[in-house]
Image (cartoon, coloured by chain):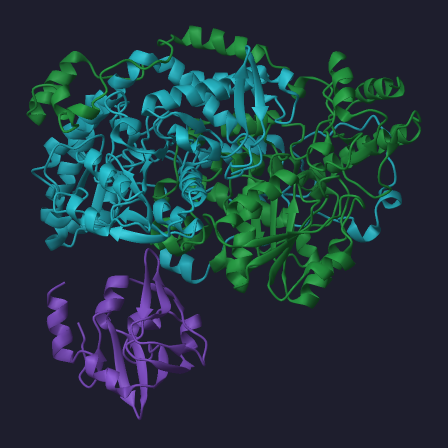
Chain colours: A green, B cyan, C purple
Amino acid sequence: MRYIPLTTDDREAMLSAIGAASVEELFSVIPKEIRFGGKFNIPSAMAEQQVLRFAKEVAGSNFPASSAPSFLGAGAYKHFVPSAVDQIAGRSEFLTSYTPYQPEISQGTLQAIYEYQTHVCNLLGMEVANASMYDGASALAEAVLMACRISGKHEVVVSNLVNPRWRRVVATYAANLGDAIVETSDHKAGKIDAKSLAEKISPNTAAVVVQSPNFFGNVEDLSAIGDLCREKGVLFITATAEALSLGLLRPPGDFGADIAVGEGQSLGLGLSFGGPYLGLFATREKYLRQAPGRICGKTADKEGKRGFVLTMSTREQHIRREKATSNICSNQALCALKTSIYLTLTGKRGFAEIAKNNFYASAALKDKISSCGNGVRKTFDLPFFNEFLVDIPTSAEVLNKRLAEKGVVGGYDVSRDYPDMKNKILLAATELTTMNDVDMLMETLADGK
Amino acid sequence: MENKNAFNEPLIFERSKRGRIGVDVPRTTFEQKELGAHFDKAVLRGDLAGFAEVSEPEAVRHFTRLSQWNFGVDSHFYPLGSCTMKYNPKVNEVVAALEGFAGLHPLQDESHVQGALRVIYELEKYLCEIVGMDCASLQPAAGAQGEHSGLMLIHSHLKNRGNARKKVILPDSSHGTNPASAALCEYTPAPLNSGPDGLIDCGALEELMDEDTAALMITNPNTLGLFEKNIKRICDIVHNKGGLVYADGANLNAILGKTRFGDMGVDVCHMNLHKTFSTPHGGGGPGSGPVLAKGFLNPYLPGPRVKLSNGRYSVERENEKSVGMMNAFFGNFGVYLRAYAYVLSVGAEGFGDISDAAVLNANYILAKLKKHYHVPYDTTCMHECVISDKLQKDAHVSTLDIAKSLIDRGFHPPTIYFPLIVKGAMMIEPTESETVETLDLFISAMIEIAELAKTDPQSLQNAPVRAKLMRLDETAAARSPNLRHKP
Amino acid sequence: MECPDGLYYTKDHEWGMEENGILVIGVTDYAQGELGDVVFVELPEEGTIIKAGEPFGVVESVKSVSDLYSPVSGEVIEINHDLESEPETVNSSPYDRGWMIKVAMSKESELENLLSPEQYVDFIKTL
């Protein structure tokens, strides 16, 4: 097998050095009763060309949104990934290295992490960021746990316009820790009502969690919510599912977020059927000791030369064990690198321009929707980024089927998560959306039925 | 080690210059509407403060230079114990990049993604087969999430029986993620001291195990690289008092094709695809930590479940007994796609060869280093061996010094100071990917270091001298954290 | 390795100095040596009531973390705020400027359970 270099001669010589008669002898410690003697019921070994042929067949049976007109968002977005991102991240020095435990020989990874942390702070407008979490949803869950730790309280108020899948993950993490989640009911209005949010805050509340732009794509009033949190003495946690929005909209740090999390998928990571994605996590310096995840810091070596090291490790599982701020060990380092590369390439001007192009595309779509008639109208009259909800005369399922027949990936059926919102569809447009895509969608919508 | 690049690479923010850009953003074909007409000016972002401005060639050069100051499996022997730094096959990368996989949106209609669902379904099956389990979820994004899920399965199962328990027994040799994951389920850790032979002491376990203990978390082989030969009895002790056994699959590479967790009596386990199944470590992730279990725990598995019926794959979002979701979608699909390609490449017959070579390589290193280093448990090891700095202590040469001295000789050091139960531990895991010539070079280096400990210890204490940097001041980094660049 | 007279010691490597019903507490020279460079000390708030044998704080070095156990019960009347900005004082002056908390003892008899300097020195020898 091409992955195993040992020859028969090698083995003989090694066994002789060890003083064992056979390799089997090295496994004699395994009791006979649990020794596996059979053959695995899995396919026989395939040579490389066979693996590739088979994989192409299986991949070929899929219809990827990346190569078709697509209006699907709802937590994962189709954006342009510059070629240099994968070319750089695919370098084996980055790809095949591990956690930089030995800083002297890992300055590449460590400097890249330090830059990434800086990018995340700039993006979210926050003071410190960690080296990544698994995805936006689990980053949010960790933020909730952290808020409860900091405040010593065990209840969190979450807007039900936070992505439903993210809320599910938060609930999963919170369930076993006795942390209660209190949800608001904002979906009918399309955005948070600050007054009813205020009513849900109790003396047991550790934090308030909001997403902006929210799941329906609408921009929340972070200024008002931030003020409310400060007034009530609760922590303000924000979630950003569409990171590209930060090229156009003021970041959560500007509104006093205490912990800001987000999903980095839009920033240089492809759709990849849901993963690996990237959990952005940032907070205030004063809460650093309670933060989860790896963190890289700047320092100097014995000769005074600048270098970078993993630091503040006493928060982490390998030292703090059961009292650690999180159990996270491996994170999403390579994805963080890709996002770093993306933000480096796009930079100050490019990132803002791409964000604007997202806006122009979705604004144009909105206009077409508004003038469509035929029972089609934009559900909420609210400012949005990239996505918005549309009332339609049939179900989203039916519409999506008709679009699929034309080779178009439709939008998201929100009734899957909000059962009282039938006959609506969540449509997303990005900088990759073309006039032709929009026309195809509008044709089908105008067709009626 | 070659000193490839004597120069330093500034931070990208330091390279930044106003007016540069690394992408050409096409002019929109849509109307350029007025932002202020759609958004309240108060929410519009002005200048993106602190963002870099560089051209594409600069960006590429910057990251390429950074990459040259890294050690990877592709360039160096990387015997990090417990991490299984085996070769990352390139065909896996090609498979993962196929647009039919990479371009899929996770919420697309089932009919668009049958191939992807097939990968999930089949990989779950293959992994179950390899460790003797009945059902699996690929959703957990890393080993730690796998452990967290596994403990939640146990918790839900016991709670459902009206028997929620409060404790989890953890051997003192366990990986830090074990107690940290237990804490996430509000389990109190009950530590179990290893016996004098480095294994779980059945007598001590019997005393500790009670009806308030939900589970025992074990690693087999354990973190000392030793096979827990009493595993059947261990499982019985736990089961007899109504508890379950969780196996941390980090060391699975040692027993592939030789024995299976399910046959040992284990109820639930996780695997690390970025260890045993060759997916690249990426500088610290992404990994993947599937959780696998015996049939009775099936209803509790996290994440969306893929079903097959009449040749068609479908996604069952979650049943009500499920412990929930560990992350937003299917987990790290791109990672387990690579593992899928690996399983197909190795095939039914090939897994036994992997453990053969991994265990042979580790024992070879142990046999050769025995005369020069203290071996806390002098017995046949599995895929990794543990030695310590005890014999070098008198010369004031520590495990840290030995590790840094290996760097100067072109090797990534082994795992150091873990497991905690061996003072000054060095955990060496060569994996099956290495030639005996590489092992011999490593062994020579270690022997040379042991000799220098006697004749010139200071040279070791100064190491590394041939890397990009010398020893870094980690104390200053922790006392006054500087975690980001400020303009 | 220093082990000054006139102080009480514990098996958790803390020392106590009695002053009119108040016990000044810190960690021993042995402890700071084992810990390595101290980077952070987490102390309770003034006014906290603590119990003998229970953890009252945490001392962190780069690579390790240790709980601080109280030798006596009582109220924390003062903590050493200098350690916030200069945690390294625990290393350089563990018995003097590196003191951690002052406790107004509620049960002075608990002092009888503590070790004398000689007993502590003997104890360290067994480690």
Determine whether, in the image, residue B82 is placed left or right of residue A52: left
Q: Quadrant of the N terminus of chain A?
A: top left
Q: How many marks?
A: 0
Is residue C65 at least partly visible in the picture? yes
| C101 in relation to B483, above or below | below
| Residue drawn where x is 29% and y is 48% of the image | B169
Looking at the picture, tell me which residue is in the foreground, A20 or B445: A20
- Looking at the image, which is closer to me, C105 or C46? C105
Q: Position of residue B465 (x, y in %)?
A: 28, 44
Residue B87 appears in which quarter of the rendering? top left
Residue B210 in picture, x, y percent from top left: 27, 50
Farthest-out residue, bottom:
C20
Q: Is residue A1 visible?
A: no
Tell me which residue sits at (50%, 59%) in the image.
A149
Q: Quadrant of the C terminus of chain A?
A: top right
Q: Position of residue B12 (x, y in %)?
A: 56, 42
Q: Is residue B345 above or below residue A88?
A: above
Q: Quadrant of residue A283?
A: bottom right
Q: Residue at x 25, y 67 (%)?
A: C31
Query: Does A31 sit above or below residue B119?
Result: below
Q: Is residue B463 left or right of residue A19?
A: right
Nearer the observer, A39 or B484? A39
Q: Which percent across, then down, holds residue B314?
A: 58, 20
- Residue, x 54% and y 38% (percent of image)? B325
